[in-house]
Amino acid sequence: MSLEMIAVLIFTMGYLLGSVPFGLILARLFGSVDVRQVGSGNIGATNVLRTGRKDLAALTLFFDIGKGALAVLLAHGFSYHLYQKTGCAPDLTLIAGAAAFIGHCYPVWLGFRGGKGVATMLGVSFAAWWVAGVVFAVAWLLSAKISRYSSVGGMVGAIAATISVMFMPASHEIHQVYMALFSGMTILLLWRHRGNIKRLLSGQESRIGDPQ
């Protein structure tokens, strides 16, 4: 099998894993509600929380983080196995991570209308380089707590993680690849938040804890 075909398979695996809409599934199974008909209509943890089910929101957050991390870890394991057999193998982890993130934002199962990617990018960050994951999480929590805007927390976290990669101890080639991945995810994440940005500028964005 050619390296191109392997890369396509890994991308497909990551995309399909990222496409699993855990927020929608959990809300349907245990809340008897279509989360797309609640609040912002988003399938992420923040909107699941608007159903009044903190437990389901926490599970959604856990699984959305987990699927991003799992895609990277599975690709890493496959790359290692391939290296053990052939003595050389491409690093497929970032391909899988990018695919999982895209899958969450544009899931094939929901007509390519998915979430905004914050939790999944956090999972990819932790698995790709744990320091970036920690930076992401801390910046997300602090900025959300200070501003009381969930959207601000997610955007600041993504930007902070991308900046942290600038200080990653790695070769120039690897550093460039990681910067490309994180920059690409952050740009797409900000694009997915364009509605939130407009509401923030107009003072119409809902704060954490506000009634919907």
Image (spheres, rainbow, N blue to C red):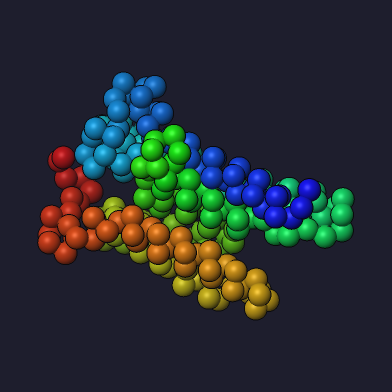
Task: Please tell me which residue is depicted at 44% across the width and 41% down the height of the picture.
Answer: 107
Horizontal and vertical percent for residue 123?
51, 51
Task: Please tell me which residue is depicted at 87% across the width and 58% down the height of the picture.
Answer: 87
Horizontal and vertical percent for residue 35?
30, 32
> Between residues 181 and 126, which one lies in front from this camera angle?
181
Task: Please tell me which residue is depicted at 78% across the width and 48% down the height of the picture.
Answer: 1
Relative vertical location of residue 83 with respect to residue 16 in this rendering, above or below: below
Q: Is residue 92 left or right of residue 206?
A: right
Q: Residue placed farthest to the bottom in the image?
A: 172
> Between residues 141 and 190, which one lies in front from this camera angle?
190
Residue 125 visible: yes
In this figure, what is the number of numbered marks? Answer: 0
Q: Is residue 70 left or right of residue 26?
A: right
Residue 73 visible: no
Q: Is residue 89 left or right of residue 51?
A: right
Task: Determine which quarter of the picture holds residue 144.
Answer: bottom left
Task: Determine which quarter of the picture holds residue 3.
Answer: bottom right
Q: Is residue 105 left or right of residue 100?
A: left
Relative vertical location of residue 149 with respect to residue 45 in this rendering, above or below: below
Relative vertical location of residue 53 with respect to residue 89 in this rendering, above or below: above
The quadrant of the picture occupied by the C terminus is top left
Horizontal and vertical percent for residue 78?
73, 48
Horizontal and vertical percent for residue 117?
41, 51
Task: Please tell me which residue is depicted at 87% across the width and 50% down the height of the picture.
Answer: 85
